[in-house]
Image: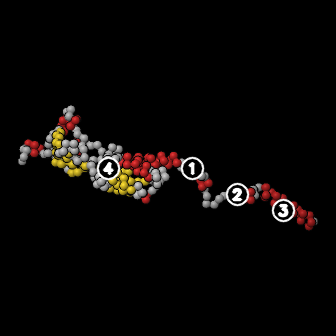
Amino acid sequence: MIMKYLLWFLISSLTLTVSSGSGFCDSGSVKPPSVGKSSTDTMPLPAATAQTEKAISQVMMDKLSNAVSSEYVIGAEDVLDITVWRNPDLSRQVQVRPDGRISMPIIRDVVAVGKTPTQLAEEMTNKLKEYVQNPVVAVTLKEVNSSNVFLLGEVAHPGKYPLKSKMTLLQGITIAGGFKETAARNQIVIFRFIESAPGTKRFTASYDDIVLRSGISDNFELKPGDTLVVPSESMVVFPGR
């Protein structure tokens, strides 16, 4: 009897063991998940191509170099921000010397006067190609000190204003805050220095003619060094007082 129960116990234990094994996978057959890594860690990121980097560089240069009008011509004493992409040691903020040149690392003196920011950037890029692989140079006008116009008389804010781009007579008056109530707006005077004919030339303009009549030609384009004067009505009515 004892042997019968013992045999029954062994068969039951063996059956239970086989049943348990068939219900679960072998832990050794499954690789444990990587600790501390996500699925994105195993996916390689596409490398930027040379063409992509060049395109990005060109966009950056265009944006920086167009901070002023593309037609603006650099003059003496202007302050320039010169950025060489990915080369901070070659980037500088410089002021144009009275002789029209700027000093930069490696390429030394460069003539800046008489060129637009874009032209200067292209020239410096070509000079740096001898020393730097695929250089990209951006030139930004930080301060305008060479091109100014002067607005005097009966305007809200008389003073010196930088001429960063094309500016007409009406635009100049607007920048100066417009006319005062006492302004003789139809007796505007512009003084301009003419190099070809030594001396100063005097122009006159009428606000009403420009705006209400066909005197659009009187809306002069202001030039560097122009002095625009808006006299008061009392000066016009009682000249010399």
Specify the amino acid type for callout 4.
Val
Specify the amino acid type for callout 3.
Ser
Q: Are marks 2 and 3 in contact (CB under 8 Å)?
A: no
Closer-to-camera residue (183/128) = 128
Quick one: label 1, few (<14), some, or many (20+) residues within 10 Å?
few
**Which comes before the other along the chain, label 4 or label 3?**
3
Mark 3–mark 1 distance (CA, rounded to whole Å): 58 Å
Single out the mark in the foreground, 4 or 2. 4
Single out the mark in the foreground, 4 or 3. 4
Closer-to-camera residue (10/61) = 61
**Which comes before the other along the chain, label 2 or label 3?**
3
Specify the amino acid type for callout 2.
Lys
What x and y, as percent, mark residue 112? 34, 50
Mark 1–mark 2 distance (CA, rounded to whole Å): 28 Å
Q: Is residue 9 visible?
A: yes
What x and y, as percent, mark residue 59? 44, 46
For mark 3, what is the residue?
Answer: 13
Mark 2–mark 3 distance (CA, rounded to whole Å): 30 Å
Left/right placement of residue 39 relative to residue 84 reads right
Which label belongs to residue 113? 4
For mark 1, what is the residue?
Answer: 46
Specify the amino acid type for callout 1.
Pro
- Which image quadrant is residue 18 in? bottom right
Residue at horizontal 59 percent and vertical 52 percent from the top: 44
For mark 2, what is the residue?
Answer: 31
Quick one: label 4, few (<14), some, or many (20+) residues within 10 Å?
many
Mark 4–mark 2 distance (CA, rounded to whole Å): 70 Å
Quick one: label 3, few (<14), some, or many (20+) residues within 10 Å?
few
